[in-house]
Amino acid sequence: MNVAIFGAGGPVAAGAIAWLADRHTLRLTDIASLDTPHEYRRVDVTDPDQVAAAAEGMDALINCTVMRPDPVLAFDVNTRGAYNVMRAAVMQSVPRVVHTGPAQIFATRGGYQNEWNLTEEAPPRPGVNLYAWSKYLGHEIVRTFARCHPEISTVVFYYAGFYSDEPEHRGPRFAVHVDDAGQAFRLGVEVPREQLPSNFELFHISADVPMAQVSVEKARRILGYAPRHNFEHVWSRRARAAYEGSGGNEARPG
């Protein structure tokens, strides 16, 4: 398959490239220059014409673009960028789109920070963070395009952060290793349309850890997602530190 990746220079796309390169022909796009053996195009995702041109001849589009701190660019990239990618899919008759974004339904305030084993059915609660809202609006644009254009099969991934192999790397308790994120991208591109319950499907992509905040059961069942990294060295270290910090005394009922 011919696959275009938008935002290919960021960490989210790194795993996707690694998992897709040996099975698909990649067209990498980013606003920054990339040193890559694959086809590269400089594309500003806020420019609809550039995005449409990059989507020409593709079988799948992956949107990994993201902007967090700048209040104007965050909206342009995360919201308008999502619109431009879906518009390009319609214009160029691309049958599959994989869209990405944060698990913004778990806002720090007003979200689900004290909940566990949440499924994709949990209603969005983006809180008051601009980044979360710009991504949330982008996701709603993607959902609306899918509803209006059933010929496009759209897969959306929610994730909350990425661990590398650095021993002291910390991240959210529902993060994912970049390698497992890459696996999910390949599954999202390759899953047969008839295997998806609808032409718009949302999946949590996370590590499979004890007391997980989000459930990856749907991704396992439909996509065949099988995370290989559970960060045992991280959560066991934290548990040990908490135990030692309490003086080595286990909590007892009063």
Image (spheres, rainbow, N blue to C red):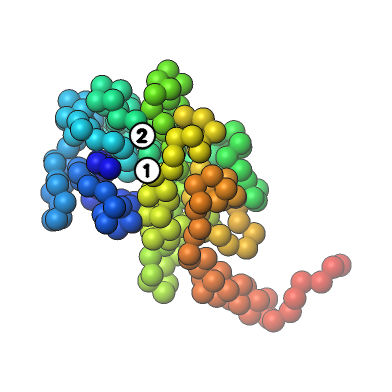
**Is residue 5 found left or right of 118 in the rendered image?**
left
Q: Taking the image as drawn, is residue 204 in sight?
A: no
Residue occupying the far top of the picture: 148
Is the residue under label 2 in contact with that under label 1 (CB below 8 Å)? Answer: yes
Which is nearer the eye, 232 or 137?
Answer: 232
The quadrant of the picture occupied by the C terminus is bottom right
Where does label 1 land, which residue? 189
Residue 139 location (% of width, % of height) = 43, 31
Q: Earlier in the sequence, mark 1 or mark 2?
A: 2
Q: Determine whether 245 is above or below 151 in the image.
A: below
Q: Position of residue 44 (x, y in %)?
A: 19, 35
Question: Which residue lies at the image location 28% right of the left edge and 25% below the top edge?
Answer: 93
Q: Is residue 116 left or right of residue 24?
A: right
What residue type is disc 2 on?
Arg
Amino acid type, mark 1? Val
Instruction: Please tell me which residue lies in front, 250 or 138.
Output: 138
Q: In the rendered view, does 67 fall on the left or right side of 210?
A: left
Asked if 254 appears above or below 139 in the picture, the reply is: below
Q: Residue placed at 26% from the left, 22% from the top?
A: 91
Instruction: Residue 62: give its label.
Output: none
Tell me the quarter of the image containing the N terminus: top left
**Extreme right residue here?**
254
Element type at mark 2? strand
Element under label 1? helix
Q: Is residue 211 above or below residue 56?
A: below
Would you say residue 55 is visible in this rendering? yes
Few, some or many C-alpha atoms within 10 Å of disc 2 (few <14, some 14-19, many ≥20)?
Answer: many
- Horizontal and vertical percent position of residue 197: 54, 33
Residue position marked by numbered label 2 in the rendering = 96
**Badge 1, how many Cα within 10 Å: few under 14, some, many 20+?**
many
| Residue shown at 41% from the left, 31% from the top | 153
